[in-house]
Structures are given as C-alpha cells and as structure tokens.
Amino acid sequence: MNGDLVIFICIGICIAILVWILFGKQIFNIIINGVAGFIIIYCINGLLPAYAIGINLLTMGVASLLGIPGIITLYIISMMI
C-alpha cells in the first residue's frame, strides 16, 4: 500500500471514532426513530390503504428526525392531495 493511502485511512478511522464518541447517542436515537417510524407507517398503510404513503428515503427521514408528529403531518398532506 502507498504510505499516503495508509495515512488517509487512519485519519478517516480517527474521524469516524470521534464522530461516534461525540454524536453516538443522537445517531442511535435517530436510527431507533427511523425503525419505529417504518413500523408505524407500515401498520397505518395497512389500516388506511386509501391514504397510504410510500416508504422511501424522504418519509423515513421525516419519521427519523420528527418522529410521530412528522408521520402525522405526512398523512395529513397525503389526505389533502
């Protein structure tokens, strides 16, 4: 391996560890909110197929960052359209 490549890999690993130490709890909470949002959207889509919203990157981002209020907002927008 090239010496510069090894240095860049080590710097990248150090930055990843630093980000995990500083923001680990927030990242974990966002992942948990995303999984819970996926389950909630999937269940509501089964109960209200006329107003079903797709499960994609945008809806999962809203569910991850905003939680249940974000999911409710997505369904309100879906009902208005």
Image (cartoon, rainbow, N blue to C red):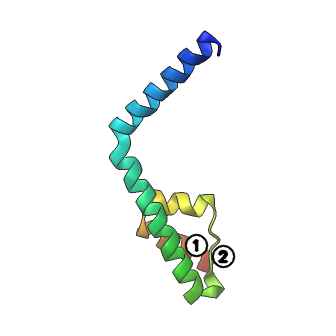
Residue at mark 2: 81
Extreme-front residue of the structure: 1
Residue 15: image location, x then y, percent: 45, 27
At a point 55% along the width and 70% down the height, the residue shown is 74
Residue 64: image location, x then y, percent: 47, 59
Residue at mark 1: 77
At a point 62% along the width and 82% down the height, the residue shown is 51
**Amino acid of disc 1:** Ile
Residue 68: image location, x then y, percent: 42, 70
Q: Identify the element where label 1 is drawn.
A: helix
| 41 is higher (above) or lower (below) than 35 | below
* Tag 1–tag 2 contact (CB < 8 Å): yes
At a point 55% along the width and 23% down the height, the residue shown is 9
Left or right of 16? Residue 2 is: right
| 19 is higher (above) or lower (below) than 26 | above
Gap in angstroms between the C-alphas marked 1 and 2: 6 Å
